[in-house]
Amino acid sequence: MNSKFNRRNWLKSSSLLATGLFAGIPAIAGKRNPQISIPEFEFLSEHELTRKELKDLPPLKARLLSNENAFGPSEKAKQAIIDAINDSFMYPRDAREEFTQLIAEKEGVSPDQVILGAGSTELLMAASLYYGLKGGKIISGDPSYMSLVRMSGSYGADWDKVPLTSDYKLDLEEMEKRVSDDTSLVYICNPNNPTGTSLDTEKLKDFCKTVSKKKPVFVDEAYIDYAGGIEAKGMGSLLKEGYDVIIARTFSKAHAFAGLRIGYCIALPETIENIKKYSTRGGTTSATSLCGAIASFQDDEYMKYTVAKNAEAKEYTYGFLKDLGYDYIPSDTSFILFPIPMEGEKFRQKMLEQGIGIKVWEFDNQHWCRVSMHKIEKLKIFEAALRELPG
Ligand SMILES: Cc1ncc(COP(=O)(O)O)c(C=O)c1O
């Protein structure tokens, strides 16, 4: 029996086939198992790790763990950063204002509906302070991106976790049912991290319209550029109609600014005022990064290019996963989640030994690997390591 055959057998005998995930086909019925355990470590973004944790990370040959974009930043952004250096002895008030105006224009909101941050984590934190200090519960998917929920926990709010649907999407119906007087915020990550799935745009709009009349809805659109873009898929247009939604965007993903640290939120003016009380009001953003972001945001050609490169990387990864008998969840993001036939931590260690960084999860009675997209040569290192695993 070769290893491919073994893996296929393993998949067949796992709960995956029974729930219909095989070949990416949604399950016919039934909810996911609510027994979910995610190691505390997995809640953290890389920039939230302590120095000790960082020191323990070995040098990596293939860094496929933080959903960074190896295809950027755009040439225009790089040039704008270089051009900004001479004047960067000054606080970047003008660049902040220009970027705020540009965002407002692109999003169809007024500048007082925009707040900037050095990455969206800063704004997730400000929101978690404002809403977390209210106490009560933050409703979000499980598994989903945890920064806001985890930080809110430190300030007094509990996590009301809602298992995903059988096709590994956020369960909007159940989330809506859970909204009560005790809810302080509903957090939606669309597309969802770590599953890579996105929601039907009209369904999400309807959800936001209904739920935000009762409680604010925070929509984290970190990966929206990979899922069809802000205009087609984003929820920002709801603000014009007065709905209490908060939309978070980061430049760390498609714009490839993870190291440059740029993010923003748009919301109703009064919501922005409330969140601002707990933030630096954009004061942590640097002149260079702001000028780079202004250029990148207007560089449509670059966006097309980087999204296409990411799609190529995904196709390549789907190809070798299929070839090796692994299943996967089709992704609308820059990472792919797939079930693995061994305990997650063991798998992570095996990959680390070969200089490959990935992340692992455990949910739905299953261990999972999340692999970030990268240049094909880096994905080939991961492919080779997978091929060497005993079947
Ligand atoms: C869903 C989601 N939101 C927010 C962030 C934070 O991004 P940053 O702080 O780099 O803007 C990430 C980073 O991985 C993410 O996956």
Image (cartoon, rainbow, N blue to C red):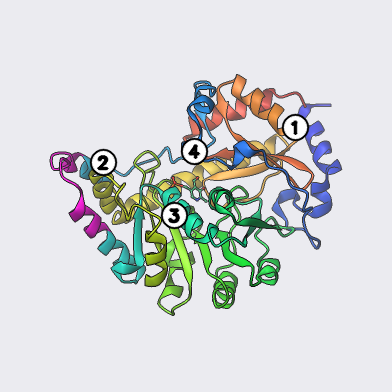
Contact? badges 2 and 3 (CB < 8 Å)? no
Span highlighted in magenta in the image: 82-99
The residue tagged with tag 4: helix, strand or loop? helix
Q: Residues within 10 Å of mark 1 (few under 14, many from 20)?
A: some
Identify the mark at residue 126; answer none if there is no mark: 3
Q: Is mark 2 within 8 Å of ligand 1?
A: no
Residue 229 image position (x, y, % from top left): 44, 60
Q: Nearer the viewer, residue 267 or 294?
A: 267
Alpha carbon distance from label 2 to label 3: 29 Å
Alpha carbon distance from label 4 to label 3: 15 Å
| Residue found at x 37% / y 38% | 259
Task: Point out the tag, 2 or 4, that comes first from the N-terminus.
Answer: 4
Identify the mark at residue 343; answer none if there is no mark: 1
Identify the mark at residue 48; answer none if there is no mark: 4
Identify the mark at residue 78; answer none if there is no mark: 2
The residue tagged with tag 1: helix, strand or loop? loop
Task: Point out the tag, 3 or 1, that comes first from the N-terminus.
Answer: 3
Contact? badges 3 and 1 (CB < 8 Å)? no
Q: Which residue is most to the left? A: 86
| Viewer-side label of 4, 3 | 3
Res 268 seen here: no
Residue type at tag 3:
Ala
- The verdict on residue 149 being magenta is no
Alpha carbon distance from label 4 to label 1: 25 Å
The residue tagged with tag 3: helix, strand or loop? helix
The residue tagged with tag 2: helix, strand or loop? helix
| Viewer-side label of 3, 1 | 3
Location of residue 206 with respect to 309 vertically, above or below? below
Task: Point out the tag, 4 or 1, that comes first from the N-terminus.
Answer: 4
Residue type at tag 2:
Lys
